[in-house]
Amino acid sequence: MEQARRGVNREMNGRVAGCGKRFWGLLSLCFLFVCLLAGCACAAMEEGVEGLKERVLVAYETSKGSTAEIAEVIAAELREGGCEAEAVDIKDSPLPGDYDHVVVGGPIYMGSIKGVKGFVEKHRADLEERLIGAFAVGMSFAVPDEEKQAEGRKALDEAIAPFAPAHLGCFAGKIDMEKLSFFEKTAVKMVKSPVGDFRDWKAVKEWAREVIKKP
């Protein structure tokens, strides 16, 4: 009897030990499964944050292509900063409402930036919360003449009125005499405008980086 009872105890102890091992094994598997789920969730969250890039429209007016090149550089710099940015000619009728933020710019011609002014007036409602920057391109910024530069800044202010975004850029432009009409060549000579490419790409890029800086 004593031997039988000992045998039963050993069998019961073996079963208990086996159950314990299975329990801890199952618990370990559950822990690993939870960790795996947590890792997947974190990865999905990170991917989601990266996917939520702010869309920025750089809407520009251009005559001979000089301002278009500046707008493309601005858009490229914004992309480098983590935004989803594209430069679009105003003539192609971009819609500010399709973007999170908008930057507008154009060349000063005969003292005004008419294309930008018309764009701002047309999309005033959508620009209320979206316009973060504006820039003007002109030869008035290529000479150390404060009066002429003030006139250029005034042209930009009038083009984007009633808005006053925090970031305003004033860049020297480019005049290629071969691309000008007879009337335009005559006008350049009359006002004694400098001729050549005076665009400061470093200044353009620095300004673009300031536009997307968070307060």
Image (spheres, rainbow, N blue to C red):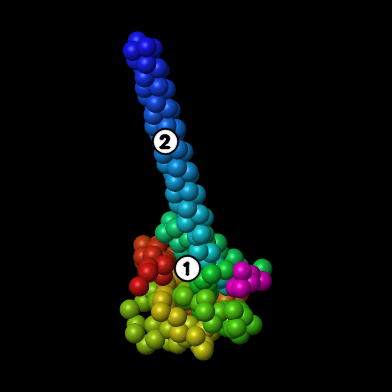
Task: Classify 138 as above or below 164.
Answer: above
Residue at the image position 56 percent from the left and 79 percent from the top: 127
Name the one closer to the observer, 47 or 1.
1
**Is 104 displayed left or right of 35 in the figure?**
right
Q: Which corner quadrant holds the C terminus?
A: bottom left
Task: Classify 53 as above or below 102.
Answer: above
Identify residue type, mark 1: Lys
**Residue at the far front in the pictured view:** 1
| Mark 2 and mark 1: Cα distance apart in space | 72 Å
Residue 126 appears in which quarter of the rendering? bottom right
Q: Which residues are magenta?
A: 93-98
Q: Position of residue 96 (x, y in %)?
A: 60, 73
Q: Position of residue 87 (x, y in %)?
A: 55, 64
Q: Earlier in the sequence, mark 2 or mark 1?
A: 2
The dot on residue 8 is none
What is the crowding at mark 1: few (fewer than 14 residues within 10 Å), some, or many (at least 20)? many
- Whether residue 9 is visible, yes or no, is yes
Name the one closer to the observer, 167 or 176.
167
In the rendered image, which residue does mark 1 sit on?
174
Residue 116 appears in which quarter of the rendering? bottom right
What is the crowding at mark 2: few (fewer than 14 residues within 10 Å), some, or many (at least 20)? few
**Is 58 displayed left or right of 19 in the figure?**
right
* Residue 165 counted in the magenta span: no
Name the one closer to the observer, 143 or 130.
130
Identify residue type, mark 2: Leu
Q: Position of residue 196 (x, y in %)?
A: 44, 66
Name the one closer to the observer, 102 or 61.
102
Query: How many marks are shown on the rendered structure?
Result: 2
Residue at the image position 37 percent from the left and 68 percent from the top: 213
The dot on residue 27 is 2
